[in-house]
Amino acid sequence: MRATPPSTTETFLNFIYPLIRNTPGIRQLSTLSVVSLTSLVVLTSSILGFTSTILLSDVVVQPIPSESKEVNVTIDYIWNENGAGPDEIIYEARDFRYTPAQANSYWKTGPANFPAFAEYFVEAPVVPGIVDTGTTLRSFIPFSNADDRSRLRYYKGKAVVWDARVVCQKPQISGFSVYTDDSGNVDLAIGGTVRKTVSSDMIQNAQPEATAFFCGISDAISICQLPNSDIGSVGIHLEYYEWPPLAYGGGLKSEFSTADRKTRNGAAYLILNQTFGQSSFLDENPEWTEIGNAKGNQGVEITIVGTLCYTPLDVVDRDVEISRAQTQPETEFASYQVLADPERDFDGPFLGINAVKGIYTFEKVLPLLLPSEPNKGPESRGIFNLLPSEAGWAIPESEAVGSDGPWPSRTNLTRPDQLHFLADALHLKYRKPYALQFEDEGNYELYGNFSVSLSEFFSQLEVAYDIGSYIIGGKDWQQDLFSAVKDHPKGNVALALQSILTVIASNAYYNNLQLLPRQETVSVVTFQNVSSPGGPYGTRRGGEYSLKQQGLFSNRVKGRFPVGYSIVASVLCFQIILAAVILVRFLRETTLTRIGDPWQALAQVATEEFEGLETILELSKRVDTDREAVAKEMKSLGVDETLVGVEQHDRSTKLIHRGGRGGAGEA
C-alpha cells in the first residue's frame, strides 16, 4: 500500500470506518452501496499502484534476433594452381593442398556431441525397386564454438555443401567366391561380380557393368565400397589367389553437376550382413538379396545378404541461406545402455570373445537424421533450413585459384588432395601393402575396394589375420545407429547409410575447421538473450512458440496473452466503470443550484452568531434515522421550532433568525 497521503490506510480510518460506526443502518441498501463502492475503488486503486510490478511480470529474459552483421569465417581449403605449396615443395598438379587424414581414420572415431546441420530436401519420386532418401543436401555451420552454432538465426554467404543423397536396390551377384586363410578354416572375404538390377538416370553406370568386388566379412554389419579407381592387378595382394583388374564401381549423379559434366563421381557400396537372412526379412525388404554362404563363428555356415547402394560423395562451396527460427542446444550424440545379459557373443567370426553387452541409443539424434513429417521443413526436426542462391546448386566448375575446384578429369583418383577433404574422409581407401607402395610412386592409397566392419571387436582381427589392407573394424555406435535408423518406422537402409556418412562428415569437418585457410565474409543474425515482453524468438505472443512462453501464469494460459498486462487492463477498465457508476449515482441523488453545492453554500452563510445552528447541522447528517426520532430529539434540545431565513448582506447572504425558541435574535 502506498504511504503517501491520501493513503489507503487513511481512507479506511477516516472515511469508511466512521461511516460504518456512525450509521446504525449500515445494512440498508444506500449505506451498503456507498461502503461497497468505496471499498472497490480503494481495492482497484491499490492494485493499480502495483502496475509497474505487474507489467514487469510479463518481461522475461529470452532470445530474440539481433541486427544483421558481417563477419569473417573460414569455410574450406583453397584450390591451388601449379606452384609451391605450404611446405615449399613445387607441385605440378592442381589440388587443394591439404594434408590428408590417415586412411579411413574417421571411420574409427565418433563425436561426443552432434552439431546441427542445415538441410535442403526434395522428396524423391517413387521408383519400383529403389529405396531413395530423396534429394538431400547438407551444410555444416562454419563456427567452431558450439554456443555460436546454437544461437545462429540466419546465415547468408559461402558455405560447404555436401550432396548426401543415397539410393539402394537389390544387387545381382555372380561368380560368388569365398576366400579363406592359409589353413582354409577361416573365411576372410567374399568376391565375385555385382551389377544393378534397376536402371535409373541418376545412377552413374559402373564400368564395366558387372563390377568385380572383394569384400571382407564379419558377423557384424559391414560396408564394402566397390572400386572407385582403375587399381589394376595390384588391387588386392594376397599370395594365395590371383585378383583380376578392377574398375569404376558406379556412383550417383550430383545435384551440383551441370548437364555437360562427364566426369564420373560418387561411390557404390555393398552392405553385407548375416543376421538379416530370414525369408521374412527378404520379403519385407526387396532391396536386399542373398549373396551366398560362408562359415561364420565356430565354423557354422551362415547366409550372407546384401544390398547395393549409391551416393554422389560430391562436396562444393556455394552461396547459401541458412536459417532457423529458434535456438537449439547441441545434443549429446549417444548414450550407452548396459543390457541385463552380462555376456555377449563376440562380433567377429574368428575369436571367441565375451564382454559386457550394451547398446548405444540415439533418442536425441534420430530426429535430426530421419526425414521430416509431410509438409514440415527441416526446422521441425531441430536442424537448419538450407536454400541456394539465385544461381542454384548446379553451376559450371571453376579452376580459378580460391574456387572449390573441378572434379579431376582422370578416372583413377590417386591423389587424395585432388578431392575435397570431406569426400576424401568419406571414401573408404585401400592401402597397398608396404612392399608394393613404391611400384607406382605416390600411388599407395586408392579409393574403394575396401570394407569396414561396424564393430570395435573386429579391430582385434586386423592384426591377428593381417587383413587390415582391405577391411578394418569400425565403431560399435555405427552398427547401433545403422540398425536404429533402418528399423525405425520412418527409416530404411538408404537412410541408415546416409546417417553414418553424415556423422563421419560432420566429425571430419569440425576436426579441420580451425585449419581451413579460405576466408569468406558472410552476413549473420544471431539470437541474443534480452528482457522482452513479447513471444519467444522475437515472435508475437500466442504464435507458433506460445507453449514456450515464460512469465506470470503463462503455462496456465498456454502463452496466448500477457497475463500481467491483462490484469492491469482489466482492473483499469473496472475502475472506469466504478467511476461511471459513482458519477451517475451522484447526479441522481443531488441537485444543481445557481450558487453551487448546497452544503458548501450553507457553510459559507452560516456563522457562529446563530445559536442552535450547529446542533441542527449535526442532526441533519442522520439521513437514514427515523424522522420521528429526530423530531423528538430536536424538541428535547429546544430547536424544533426555530425559524431561519436568508437575506442579503453586503454582496453576499446570511442566515437570520426569524423566530421560535431556538434563537436569541438576529444573527
Image (tube, rainbow, N blue to C red):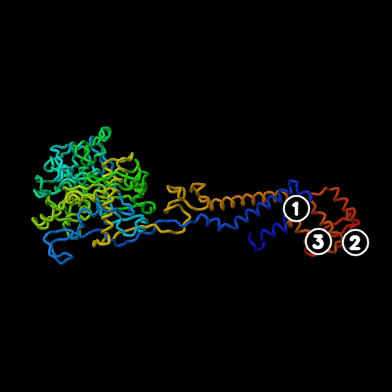
Foreground label between 1 and 3: 1
Q: Is residue 252 visible?
A: no
- Observer-nearest of 443 and 622: 443
| Relative horizontal placement of residue 559, taking residue 73 as reference (left or right) | right
- Observer-nearest of 294 and 541: 294
Q: Which mark is residue 606?
A: 3
Q: Is residue 290 visible?
A: yes
Find residue 423 and report its horizontal and vertical position in percent: 21, 52
Give the SS element for disc 1: helix
Separation (CA) of disc 1 from disc 3: 28 Å
Q: Earlier in the sequence, mark 2 or mark 3?
A: 3
- Residue in the picture at 9% in, 57% down: 438
- Observer-nearest of 595 and 260: 260
Residue occupied by mark 1 = 20
Find residue 213 and report its horizontal and vertical position in percent: 15, 43
Q: Are marks 1 and 3 in contact (CB under 8 Å)?
A: no
Tell me the quarter of the image containing the N terminus: bottom right
> Which residue sits furthest right?
661
- Residue in the picture at 25% in, 32% down: 279
